[in-house]
Image (cartoon, rainbow, N blue to C red):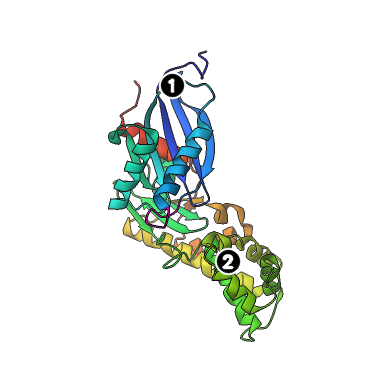
Amino acid sequence: MTDSTTDTTPVLAGFDAGQTHCRCRLSRWTGGGWHVVGEGTGSGVSHLDASGGEERFREAIRSSLQAAWPHGCQAPLAAAAVGASGVEAGTALQTRAASLLHEVVNLPEGRCVATGDERTALRGAFADQAGIVLISGTGMIVVGRNTLGEEHRCGGWGWRLDGAGSAFDLGHQGLQVSLRMADGRLADGPLRQRLWESLGCRTADALKTLVVQQDHQPADLARLAPLVDEAAAQGDREARRILDRSAFALAEAASAVARQLSLNEPNLCAHGGALLNLREFNGAVHQAMQQHLPGARWTQPLGDACDGALALARDCCQLTPH
């Protein structure tokens, strides 16, 4: 068997660039199939039009590729594809992201593909089959494809405009409820105490001061989501209502995607930390989906977003060995 550090067979790079971190997976054709030769994690991205957005994008690609590259590997990079948070398919932003990828990996622009991370998640989960991916992490987005290859998305318009069904939404709703408790609109309860203690706040004024700081980001609210989930598991009625509202919104988006693509009994895949790690929220989403799309079936994904990005990289340079 050839040592991976001396093999000069071209390598493909697939990136999954989220707000928290960017993952890179390297793949090469060996022994009759595609095999992973390296994986690594780097810094996260923000919207390209945000302050420092382009440099954050470059650094996410650079740092994750460096972390993934096998020590001493001499193989050339043949193609690269990235699914990045905030990159809308078919827009000028997609062209900019592809150009930035080209700058960092030093490949011809025709060998560099950039798209939204929801599209790489969909490709990874279902390959070329029909299905719907529900993504609920810091933010949320739902995207699907039918048997004709048509795609449609719902949600994912950023926390200032959207986000119902995400970890951010759970944390945000939690703080809103806590303020209603603090000023007497709701009876005080353990949910407020749990959230305020985690933030080191004792008063509503202190909470307001905290959230208006320039460095307070949506991810800070998303980190409160597990506390809301835990409270619901312990019987807190307000926490349960928050989960149910957020789950309904996510199921509503999935139902809209199914309707647009004429998918009456679609296969569904769950992605994102909120759906995969928050047990009570996951259960609430499953229940809401039963109401919106009773014929839908939850399935295990064929692969993840890095796999989807690698598939796009293979497509762009037509690397399908015979």
Q: Is residue 272 visible?
A: yes
| Secondary structure state at the residue bearing disc 2 | helix
Nearer the observer: mark 1 or 2; the answer is 1
**Residue located beneath label 2 in the image:** 171
- Residue 220 is situated, as x and y percent measured from the top left of the image, at 57, 61
Point 60% across, 62% down: residue: 225
Q: Kindly identify which numbered label has been placed on residue 276.
A: none
Kindly give the residue lying farthest to the bottom in the view shown. Answer: 184
Kindly give the residue lying farthest to the top in the view shown. Answer: 1
Q: Which amino acid does label 1 sit on?
A: Ala
Q: Give the range drawn in magenta.
A: 46-52
- Residue 14 is situated, as x and y percent measured from the top left of the image, at 43, 37
295 and 234: which is toward the camera: 234
- Residue 291 is situated, as x and y percent measured from the top left of the image, at 48, 65
**Residue located beneath label 1 in the image:** 75
Q: Which secondary structure dominates the residues rendered in magenta?
A: loop
293 and 76: which is toward the camera: 76
Q: Which amino acid does label 2 sit on?
A: Gly
Q: In which quarter of the image is residue 175?
A: bottom right
Q: Can residue 285 be seen in this view?
A: no
**Label 2 packing within 10 angstroms: few (<14), some (14-19), many (20+):** many
Point 40% across, 62% down: residue: 157
Would residue 47 be counted in the magenta stretch?
yes
Q: In which quarter of the image is residue 195?
A: bottom right
Spatial separation of the CA atoms under disc 1 and disc 2: 45 Å
88 and 135: which is toward the camera: 88
